[in-house]
Amino acid sequence: MGFQSFDMREPMSSHKGRKLLIVGLVCSLVIGFTIGILVGHFGIGKESDDGLPSAPGANTGEENPLISDLIMEGINPNNIRDNLKKLTGDVHVAGTPADRQQAEELRLFWEGHGLKANISSYNVLLSYSDDNDPNKAYIYSNDSAQEFETPDRENLTGVNDTFPTPYLAYTPAGNINVTEMVYANYGRLEDFRDLSAIHNISVSGRLVIARFGQISRGEKIRLAEERGALGVILYLDPADYNLNNSKVYPDDWWLPPTGAQRGSTFAGDGDPLTPGYPAIDSAYRYSENTTQPPLPGIPAVTIGYGPAKEFLKIMQGENVPDDWIGGIAVNYTFGPGLLDNKKVGLRTSNRNENRTTYNVFGIIKGSIEPDRYVLLGNHRDSWVYGAIDPTGGTAVMMELSRVMGDLFKSGQWKPRRTIIFCSWGAEEFGLIGSTEWVEEYIKNLGNRAVAYINLDIAVMGNHTLRGLGSPLLYTAMYDAARKVDNPDEDERNAGNHTVFHTWLENHRDPKKTDVPTIGPIGLGSDYASFQMRAGIPCADFRYNYDPKLGIAFYPLYHTAFETFHLLDSIMDRNFEFHSAVGKVCGEILRSLSDSVILPFNMSDYADKLTDMYDSLNTTHGDTLRQRDIRLDYLDEAISQFSTEAIAFNTKVGNIDKTNLVETRMVNDQMMQIERSFLDPSGLPGQPMYRHVIQTSSVFSGDSFPGLVDTIANAETDDTEDRWEVVKQHLSVVTFTIQSAASTLRDVTDFISAVET
Ligand SMILES: *[C@@H]1O[C@H](CO)[C@@H](O)[C@H](O)[C@H]1NC(C)=O
Ligand SMILES: *[C@@H]1O[C@H](CO)[C@@H](O)[C@H](O)[C@H]1NC(C)=O
Ligand SMILES: *[C@@H]1O[C@H](CO)[C@@H](O)[C@H](O)[C@H]1NC(C)=O
Ligand SMILES: *[C@@H]1O[C@H](CO)[C@@H](O)[C@H](O)[C@H]1NC(C)=O
Ligand SMILES: *[C@@H]1O[C@H](CO)[C@@H](O)[C@H](O)[C@H]1NC(C)=O
Ligand SMILES: *[C@@H]1O[C@H](CO)[C@@H](O)[C@H](O)[C@H]1NC(C)=O
Ligand SMILES: *[C@@H]1O[C@H](CO)[C@@H](O)[C@H](O)[C@H]1NC(C)=O
Ligand SMILES: *[C@@H]1O[C@H](CO)[C@@H](O)[C@H](O)[C@H]1NC(C)=O
Ligand SMILES: *[C@@H]1O[C@H](CO)[C@@H](O)[C@H](O)[C@H]1NC(C)=O
Ligand SMILES: *[C@@H]1O[C@H](CO)[C@@H](O)[C@H](O)[C@H]1NC(C)=O
Ligand SMILES: *[C@@H]1O[C@H](CO)[C@@H](O)[C@H](O)[C@H]1NC(C)=O
Ligand SMILES: *[C@@H]1O[C@H](CO)[C@@H](O)[C@H](O)[C@H]1NC(C)=O
């Protein structure tokens, strides 16, 4: 179908720009009186409550073009370094006194820089290991003598080495001994299926050992538990986390043998005891054994490749296929027998606890539209020192908020809309702080939030920017990246002057060639409930390693080796990459909070829908047609959305930008778009995920997530009922697109469709 692309906010030539500015000034004199009345009516003072002068032309709606430069120039890499050094001086796991103290310090920091700051807290179910009785896996001889035990924690020098011991949050305490163990590759559905269907090996009554990667930890454990396994050992394989026997930390960023990945195993979002609703005093709470989805029922440990070798070494049975072989110097076998009839055991001591987690907010109140919020958030909790995840992001957010706060405090800038910086608690346990907050204020946010920008990890490599986001924000994301100088000297010398150039080189969109691809918003960080439950468009930026490296993730992820040293001496020696991420986030935040017309591009959404349609038609079109499930209505709805988007854009180009009511009306229409894609009853089988376009799909694919998943389900289990679910959801997807199109129509003409 190929929709014509257009740019909502084409940059003006300087000549044209100047002319417009003069016209704008004259206009503002002439219509000043009218605006005065409007302003009075809407309770918006030319002088705000605090008596600060407005930014130039604020009431005529024109943003101050100098602010962008002031923000960029203000961001200082040394401050980011100092912030990171201070924040990583301590372990700051959610629900601990250190976490509470960092929340309090951040509140004071924000107050010191002119922001209004608040802390909000929730009592939620978290999970901890017992450092006096660390989780361990053991090897015993056939007469029960202990031959090996996994180390208490990573072998880490140069910092306080009594940091928390590794564990898999929410797995239960347990104590088991077995005589048989099975290697399950990545522990995916297809791995377990191959084990039983091809190799005739059951995991029932046995221990499972599997490598990290490909799917979530919780999913691996759930699949093993469903098949009767008694316990699970998850380990980091060098094939995924330390390529070519490279030099390891503290000399390089690769994983040492004792590095163990911590992490949550809860499959839901938010407090496990209050699904769908905020964990406030009046909340109904489920018990630990009735949560949905359920918490894991079998013990599991997380270990490094050093100790893993001891277990793989004693496994018997046939050799595994080539694509199951990892990078440890052993013969990988399936098991289940063990050499010399040895035994293996697990002893874990985790416990779930009711603890308090804190969110901190720093607010710069908007001068013209204070009831429109632009949010930028980052989680504060980490598993150990968390230098990469998330503390590099926290260090960047602090610096950006300092710069913006100081500009505000000194009267140089008053953003049009309200900016809210958010520091989330307990993200690591299941996006808990952000989810509870969205749950508590979903009515306020659903009506008033313009966008949410997420900053979790800021730098997990120094090769290229990478972005995730709603199509509504693609253009704003590109525009922000185009304004930021490339922090990599070699890239600058190669002619890639901005971060955008390098981003494009590494993620060229095969269909568009002149812009990089932006991934969909999924479940990976605090954006999830904003996008999928509240329909607030989200974007997420970070600097990444070379995607062509072929590793599972950055090697030291969630290990104790995520220290200040790692970033300061190995990955970002001058903090220029952190700084670049801060500038990209700062520019998009400025643009969203200060532009008269929101920098949302409807046509990017139309193009995205077209791509999703094409992918669906290519992959499943024939199957669907054979079952007489037709895609015509969907096709038509997308065309209609596209037509409305173009008409809407023309209209926006012609409105009087000095008229507050007119600008507010078109901005509200644009804000409505993302909300229109929500279906109140949620995706089939996933009531919490209500966004039919931007929701994480189980079976992946670059098409409508609910359709991809329901079709896959129907193909696996070919029953009439399942195909009925597909038909039903297809009509919901079609309807949400029709309804999105209707919100773009002129405000009294929405009832009849425009001719196409
Ligand atoms: C939020 O912080 C402001 C000061 O910045 C304070 O006046 C107000 O009471 C706080 N609100 C809450 C709910 O703590
Ligand atoms: C496992 O075996 C070890 C060594 O014999 C023993 O100390 C431990 O109590 C056993 N655990 C269970 C649950 O039997
Ligand atoms: C721990 O580190 C020390 C010093 O680098 C080294 O001597 C020792 O062998 C390491 N132990 C393990 C288990 O890697
Ligand atoms: C190291 O950390 C532990 C646990 O957080 C703490 O009790 C101890 O005081 C710290 N030691 C030093 C030297 O800071
Ligand atoms: C599969 O394994 C079971 C138990 O080990 C055995 O009884 C059965 O014969 C095996 N089936 C095949 C097809 O090899
Ligand atoms: C759930 O746990 C509670 C204690 O927290 C216990 O009293 C109850 O019997 C358990 N219910 C089930 C179904 O296991
Ligand atoms: C792997 O098995 C082969 C024989 O199949 C043997 O020659 C080799 O020594 C074994 N390697 C290790 C590391 O055990
Ligand atoms: C028990 O282990 C010893 C080595 O520790 C081995 O020599 C012996 O054969 C084993 N016994 C059995 C029954 O496997
Ligand atoms: C959790 O602790 C708080 C006090 O910190 C208490 O008010 C709340 O009732 C507790 N909740 C549960 C489920 O135990
Ligand atoms: C950017 O750098 C790459 C090499 O990494 C080079 O191929 C490309 O031409 C450069 N782009 C520009 C715009 O110079
Ligand atoms: C980029 O990261 C690599 C390690 O992946 C490191 O060798 C290099 O020095 C880093 N560059 C900068 C400027 O820090
Ligand atoms: C869908 O796919 C079919 C078969 O490949 C093709 O004929 C048709 O034109 C496609 N429909 C659209 C709207 O692209």
Image (tube, helix red, strand yellow):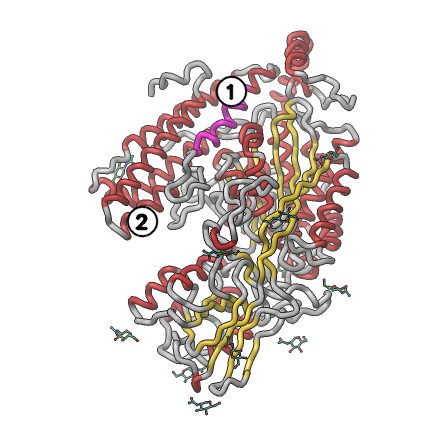
Residue range of the region highlighted in magenta in the rendering: 665-678
Q: Which amino acid does label 2 sit on?
A: Asn
**Which of the numbered marks, if any, corresponds to residue 155?**
none
Closer to us: 749 or 301: 301
Q: Quadrant of the N terminus?
A: top left
Distance (Cα) linking label 2 and label 1: 43 Å
Q: Which residue is drawn at 58% across and 52% down?
A: 125
Residue 447 within the segment the image draws in magenta: no
| Image side of residue 552 versus residue 609, left or right | right
Task: List the residue tagged with mark 1.
Answer: 652
Q: Is mark 1 on a helix, strand or loop?
A: helix
Packing grade of label 1 (10 A; few <14, some 14-19, many >=20) is: some
Residue 654 placement (x, y as % from top left) = 52, 16
Vertical placement of 13 versus 725: above or below? above
Residue 478 placement (x, y as % from top left) = 54, 38
Q: Please tell me whether mark 2 or mark 1 is closer to you in this view.
A: 2
Residue 408 placement (x, y as % from top left) = 74, 31
Q: Which amino acid does label 1 sit on?
A: Val
| Image side of residue 232 versus residue 414, left or right | left
**Which of the numbered marks, if any, corresponds to residue 713?**
2
Residue 668 within the segment the image draws in magenta: yes
Looking at the image, can residue 466 be seen?
A: no
Q: Is mark 2 on a helix, strand or loop?
A: helix
